Image (spheres, grey):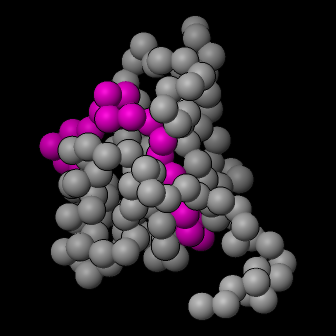
Amino acid sequence: MPSYSVTYFKLLTSYSDWSRLRICVLGAAHGWFFKYNTRVHIDKILESFAAHCPNLEALEIQWDPDTIRFSDKSRKFIDRIRLKCSRLKSLTLSDGKYYEMVKGNFERAHCPRVVRTNTTYNTSIVSLLEHYKDLRFN
């Protein structure tokens, strides 16, 4: 079994430590590591985050549109993560059909600034610093 399949399986089955998760970045930007031979089912990932990560603040999915697979019921999973992860401030995706669908869903729910594209925004862990509020000046 290739290593990415083991990692993907581990991601979807190791829920015990997820409740404290606040920031998560998935995937490899621009396919710099290797090209996936299989497509990642994004609906299952969003469902897992919605069910097990109530404190999630930022989620970045760096896989390109060719790697992401989604179904006709994706809107249901997008609604779940939007409702269950109430602290979610940033959901970063690569440009494409899925990004447009997610962005439209959040805009209809009056949360237009949550969904971002990874060409203009990168998720960082700076907000987890102890004195982050002192660094902000806006």
Q: Is residue 35 magenta?
A: no
Q: Is residue 50 magenta?
A: yes
* Above-or-below relation of 94 to 2: below
In this picture, residue 40 sits left or right of residue 74 = right
Segment tinted magenta in the rendering: 48-74
Q: Where is residue 81 shown, x and y percent of the image?
A: 40, 62
Quarter of the image for the N terminus: give it: top right
Quarter of the image for the C terminus: give it: bottom right
Q: Where is residue 72 shown, x and y percent of the image?
A: 15, 43
Please tell me which residue lies in front, 1 or 34: 34
For residue 61, say whether it is visible: yes
Dividing the picture into quarters, in which one does residue 71 lie?
top left
Q: Where is residue 32 shown, x and y percent of the image?
A: 56, 25
* Above-or-below relation of 117 to 135: above
- Residue most extreme to the right: 130
Q: Residue at x 42, y 13 (%)?
A: 37
* Above-or-below relation of 28 to 61: above
Q: Residue at x 58, y 58 (%)?
A: 123
Q: Residue at x 59, y 22 (%)?
A: 33
- Residue most extreme to the left: 72
Q: Residue at x 49, y 73 (%)?
A: 89
In this picture, residue 117 sits left or right of residue 124 = left
- Residue most extreme to the top: 1
Q: Where is residue 93 shown, x and y percent of the image?
A: 40, 50
In this picture, residue 34 sits left or right of residue 134 = left
